[in-house]
Image (spheres, grey):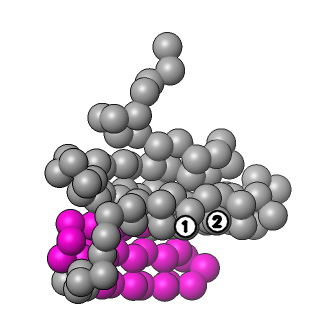
Amino acid sequence: MRTCIVFALCVAVATAAAITDSKDAVILRSDLENIGVDGFQWAYETSDGKSAQEQGQLKNVGSENEALEVRGQFAYTAPDGQVYTVTYVANELGFQPQGAHIPKSA
């Protein structure tokens, strides 16, 4: 269940990056590699300045502490022209984003 929640959060964050008008955007690059139980990775880039990539794999396979760990990044150009980039890790400790525009805890 926790794995599904982490994955859903990652998808939601990547989707939220689509805040600019993209009706004329074209896909410049799209890669997907699903290597089964050993993990997955995907990446894309569009002509309107959006890009994302992610890779995931199971940690502690077969143990009581088995968990999915996902690492990735996404970037987009905001309406003001600034490029925002977020890198993240999502695992049993939750979603952990980092970016120059994200406030850091003290």
Extreme residue toward the top, this view = 106
- Is 102 part of what is drawn in magenta? no
Location of residue 61 with respect to 25 vertically, above or below: above
Instruction: Please state the horizontal and vertical placement of residue 50, each as a whole percent of the image.
Output: 27, 67
Q: Secondary structure at mark 1?
A: helix
Q: Residues within 10 Å of mark 1 (few under 14, many from 20)?
A: few
Q: Is residue 48 above or below residue 30?
A: above
* Residue placed under numbered mark 2 in the picture: 8
Residue 51: tell me if it is visible: no
Identity of the residue drawn at 21% across and 71% down: 48
| Residue at image coords 81%, 64% | 1
5 or 47, which is in the foreground?
47
Say which amino acid is labelled 2. Answer: Ala
Q: Which residue is mark 1?
A: 11
Residue 93 in which image quadrant: top right
Query: Seen in the image, is 49 located left or right of residue 92?
Result: left
Instruction: Give the percent coordinates (x, y) of residue 10.
Output: 55, 61
Based on the picture, tell me whether residue 32 belongs to the magenta stretch.
yes
Magenta span covers which residues? 29-54
